Amino acid sequence: MHKLLTTIGFDADDTLWQNEQFFRLTQDRFADLLADYVDAEHLSERLLEAEKRNLGHYGFGIKGFTLSMIETALDVTDHKVPGEVIHDILMAGRDMLRHPIELLPGVRDTIAELAAEYRILLVTKGDLLDQERKLAQSGLGEMFDGVEIVSDKTAQVYRRIWDTHADGPERSMMVGNSMKSDVVPAIETGAFGVYVPHEVTWELEHAPKPLAHPRYHEITTLSELPALIAEIG
């Protein structure tokens, strides 16, 4: 029988393994370092503003986050932040880059099951070296038929990926925890978009759910994906 779906793309951070929780823990550490200068809530707002400004310069990932923390520390202290605090911020970023990978429940079994019948892709954005490190440590690398580490996830990027690795968008699916990066732009190309919520998601990855779209689906955990795909056909 002719299958409707032939290709399934997976997001990496907070879809396959933990990620955002380490950013939140580091942000708490950042707030402690600057507690003598500013309250945590105001600091968080200023940091988010810096991250928004810097995305076009540094892209997504830990290195850009670390530079945004340093910029914010300088900003909120009127450039009076002690050198040891800057050092501690750099060390916090380095600790994030060394953190071991923690796969989310059901990930390995789900991908192994689907890889037997479908073309499986990893589509992730962020720092190239860090994403390559996490993929290598995850032990999932050999399960993917293609890996795309991109600077951002837009409809244009997905169209290129479907043209390169798949049989066009109509026979493709993207699965991830970010409505803004994984689901909405994939659906815009004509692919299926499957939302798998994570308990912690970065504010800049939020977007309205395309609930009325026939190619939008939502599951609670990745383990539910094979059953959903079986229904789609």
Image (tube, rainbow, N blue to C red):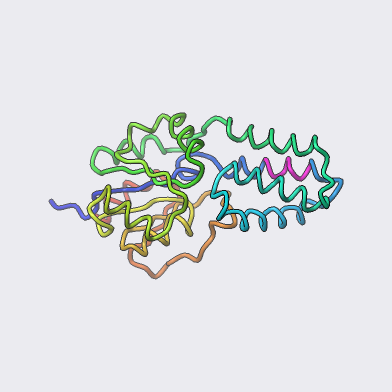
> In front here: 227 or 39?
39
Most foreground residue, 28 or 126: 126
Q: Residue at x 22, y 53 (%)?
A: 167
Residue 71 vs residue 119: left or right? Answer: right
Horizontal arrangement in the rendering, residue 9 relative to residue 204 (left or right): left
Q: Position of residue 204 (x, y in %)?
A: 57, 57
Q: Is residue 215 left or right of residue 43?
A: left
Counting from the top left corner in percent of width and height, residue 146 is at 32, 41
Q: Residue at left 45%, top 31%? A: 138
Residue 223: give x, y in percent of width and height: 39, 43
Residue that extends furthest to the left in the rendered view of this protein: 1
Relative image position of residue 52 (x, y in whole percent): 61, 57
Which residue is at the front of the view, 179 or 76?
76
One can see residue 12 in this view: yes
What are the residue bounds of the magenta stretch?
Answer: 26-32
Dominant secondary structure, magenta? helix
Determine the residue positioned at 76% across, 45% down: 31
Horizontal side, residue 168 vs residue 54: left or right: left
Asked if residue 121 is positioned above or below residue 173 in the image, the reply reads: above
Considering the image in quadrants, where does the C terminus appear? bottom left
> Eyeballing the image, is 187 above or below 142?
below
Where 112 falls versus 60 (above or below)? above
Residue 104: tell me if it is visible: no
Q: Is residue 233 magenta?
A: no
Is 3 rendered above or below residue 87?
Answer: below
